[in-house]
Image (cartoon, rainbow, N blue to C red):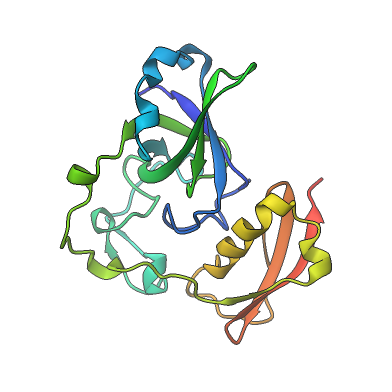
Amino acid sequence: MRVIARVHSDFSSKFGVPRQSGLVEELESTLVFEPEFRNEDALRGLEGFSHLWLVWVFHQAARGEWSPTVRPPRLGGNARLGVFATRSPFRPNPIALSAVRLAGVERTAGQGTVLRLRGADLVDGTPVLDIKPYLPYADCVPGALGGFAAAPAGETVEVAIPPDLLERVPPDRREALRGVLAQDPRPRYQEDPDRVYGFGFAGLEVRFSVSGGVLAVREILEKP
């Protein structure tokens, strides 16, 4: 397998990234092709599609060994299911599949033609192996069963960000950050109201705690 592109997003690590694509539509990212694949002919006709499938690598979760069972966060991390019945990143082959919105195809001077994406659930620098157009008639199956994750978790907490802290976030990133926080990035099995969590977002370090169903942002710091 050859890496054809890498995604540039606001997430410096996997903590904080939405658990599925499309959950936070406001998230913006850019797909930049590797030099050998910067050929506009390879993208001919792509602008006719609203969504794409990305086949990519869990490069921050690769392990030498695999386990037949995992603990899905959706079940609170307390129940084990078969790895092939989940979307866990800890797999025999650490590959993933995400449906993302194609927001634009842009020709740049230094990086060739890049793809503007929305709703992607990828860490900055994620290697992409392939891109395929999303076909509604084939890829959307009415009446399909969703197992233990039949419906999205949705926004699970109320988000409280002091105005002076929110001003530290670029205006075009504020709604995306709210959407990410409303999903409650914590591991499902952690309920300590005094614990402070943190993750990198848009060049910032966002620190928060959760108590009584309210996620309170404590600090937003410039990353060194």
For image coordinates 55% across by 65% down, the residue present is: 185
Position in image of residue 198 (x %, y %) = 68, 62
Residue found 57% across the figure and 58% down from its top? 16
Does residue 168 appear left or right of residue 28 in this picture?
A: right
Residue 82 in the image, given as x and y percentages of width and height: 25, 60
Q: Is residue 2 above or below residue 209?
A: above
Of residue 74 and residue 203, the one placed in the foreground of this image is 203
Residue 196 vertical position relative to residue 26 in the rendered view, above or below: below
Count all numbered tags in the image, as a single digit.
Answer: 0
Position of the C terminus by quadrant: top right
Instruction: Specify whether residue 147 is in view.
Output: yes
In this view, the residue in front, 208 or 66, is 208
Q: Tell me residue 111's x, y (percent).
A: 59, 20
What residue is shown at x 44% (from left), y 70% (from top)?
154
Quick check: 206 left or right of 147? right
Residue 193: quarter of image? bottom right
* Residue 130 seen anywhere in this rendered image of the structure: no
Question: Is residue 111 positioned above or below 47 on the image?
Answer: above
Depth check: give the residue in front, 105 or 202. 105
> Measuring 51% from the left and 43% from the top, which residue is drawn there?
60
- What is the quadrant of the N terminus in the image? top left
- Percent of width and height locating residue 173: 67, 52
